[in-house]
Image (tube, rainbow, N blue to C red):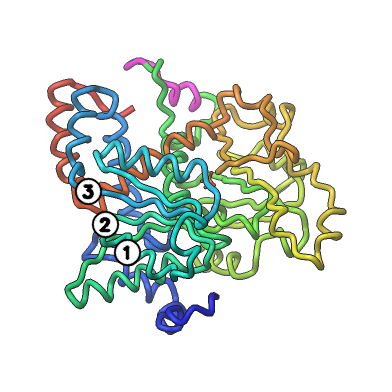
Amino acid sequence: MSDDLSFADYESRLDRSIKAKSPDFFSGDRLRHLIFSGQFTRPLLDKLCRLADKIRLLAKSKEGHRFLNTLLSHKRAMLYFTQPSTRTFMSFAAACQILGMTCNEVRDLSVSSEAKGESPFDSIRMFSSYFDLIIMRSHIPKFAECCGYMMNTLADSQRRSVPIINAGAGSDEHPTQALLDIYTIQRAFSFTDPKDSRQWTRYDELRQQFPGLRKGIAGKTIGFCGDIRRGRTVRSLAQLLALHEQVRLVFISPPHPALALPRDMKDKLIDAKVDIRECHSLEDQLDGKPVIEQFDALYMTRIQREHNSGTEEQELNELDYSHFKLTKSLVARMKPYAAILHPFPRDKEFGEIPPSIDEDERAFYFRQARNGMWARAALVAHIFDVDGEINDYYEQYNSEMQISPQ
Ligand code: CP
């Protein structure tokens, strides 16, 4: 935690459980700030995913695109990213632009007045003077949460206050990544295909081979492979999967405490009655069958070597990581509909997913990244309460065009 005095003001609020904190970040049943994945309930997740589908569809036509562009053309967003980012930064910028918002950015503190000693809290308060939304990825742990409290205090005293979105910070959470991951998994398990006809769909075809197959996330086996402990996206997504009935989560990592499923996360998932399993290789057997053949989705992650601490560096360097890399022959053994996901960036030297897999129809990771734009547009539309307008326009558009979401 920073020794900045302002942090002390929030210490007692930071120490509470997510359940106790969550109401601070809502306005009624609408998100005021998004700080944790734990703020997402199943109804809210489903609502945002449906909204993302509608935005996706409307944006395909010039007319729909024009409509979306008018919704927030009177609003401005600040993207304050003091940690590196490609996808989150770009997809938020694109999402805001889809809704007509103007975006500005601070990515390099050496060109901001923080380089002259300004506190990050003053920076955020200043941004709120000029912008209507602050999307932030900060190097300071729990800073987005503190900024949410600061904005609430300002609002309580009738001063200018704007929503804060946590765009993933350090080893904290990455709630919007979890949102886009859930959206991607939902779409993967809708089993629709542009080539489907009214008489014969991909789902019918798959059900011949897998009679128990159902649409949706419930009942699916989802693998997480690689750096489980330090992957903030794994932590956030596992929580949201736990909101779905009878999911089975399989964690595949080296048996080292720096990388394996941490106790607190395991306890939370057990409390949520999730069936969790642990393996130490993609080649392992689970319940007498190869685990690779059991996944409905497999979420690969990068080994985050930049977080190796001095004392464990040597131990971690000596581990055999070959069991945590996908190969074409492993993919060939996966179910024909299984979705391979990765939050990206992937590590080109380590090679957890070699590019030779990219053209396999099970490789969802580029679609996953694009889904980030739609899911984030849905989130911003929800925060600014324009989702009702999108729903109404969509209904009208749908009845005129006789279309349904793909
Ligand atoms: N997945 C993700 O957060 O990517 P970036 O770090 O590039 O934003």
Q: Pointer 2 and pointer 1: residues touching (CB < 8 Å)?
A: yes
Q: Residue at x 52, y 66 (%)?
A: 140
To which residue does mark 1 refer? 126
On screen, 18 above or below 56? Answer: below
Q: Secondary structure at mark 1?
A: helix
Q: CA distance from mark 2 to mark 3?
A: 10 Å
To which residue does mark 3 refer? 75
Nearest the eye: 253 or 302: 302
Percent coordinates x, y for residue 263 in the rendering:
64, 69
Point out the frontmost of discs 2 and 3: 2
Residue 357 is inside the magenta segment: no
Which numbered disc, 1 or 3, marks the residue that appears first in the sequence? Answer: 3
- Mark 1 residue's CB less than 8 Å from ligand 1: no
Q: Which mark is residue 130?
A: 2
Q: CA distance from mark 1 to mark 3?
A: 16 Å
Point out the frontmost of discs 1 and 3: 1
Nearest the eye: 361 or 232: 232
Q: Pointer 2 and pointer 3: residues touching (CB < 8 Å)?
A: no
Q: Residue at x 67, y 30 (%)?
A: 331
Q: Residue at x 21, y 28 (%)?
A: 64
Residue 108 lies left or right of residue 39; in this view the side is right
